[in-house]
Image (cartoon, rainbow, N blue to C red):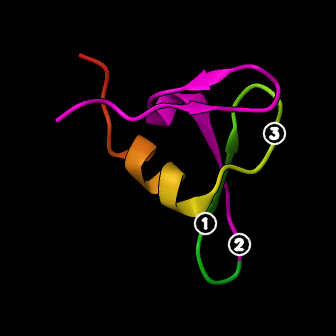
Amino acid sequence: MSLSTYRCPCGATLRFRQDLTKEQATTRPRWKCGDCGTPVPGRIAEKLRHQHPS
């Protein structure tokens, strides 16, 4: 399985859960870029949050 990555508009490359910040919402958490706080699409964030650096 290959690693998923996401390029944030701020230029940061998100690869792992550590690159995201979690905002608690009413129904489900929202994930944001750890550098700038831009929301990350839910489907992409779910993939990234299950990846671990090794």
Task: Answer left or right for 7 relative to 39.
Answer: left
Q: Residue at x 69, y 20 (%)?
A: 12
Instruction: State the SS at label 3.
Output: loop
Q: Earlier in the sequence, mark 2 or mark 3?
A: 2
- Relative to 34, residue 46 above or below: below
Q: Which residue is mark 3?
A: 37
- Relative to 33, residue 31 above or below: below
Q: CA distance from mark 1 to mark 2?
A: 5 Å
Q: Residue at x 70, y 81 (%)?
A: 26
Give the number of the disc on residue 8: none
Task: Answer left or right for 19 relative to 34.
Answer: left
Q: Looking at the image, is mark 2 or mark 3 nearer the viewer?
A: 3
Q: Could you tell me if the residues under marks 1 and 2 are in contact, i.e. CB atoms within 8 Å? A: yes
Inspect the image, locate mark 2, and give the three-letter code of the amino acid beneath it.
Ala
Task: Answer left or right for 8 relative to 9.
Answer: left
Span highlighted in magenta in the image: 1-25
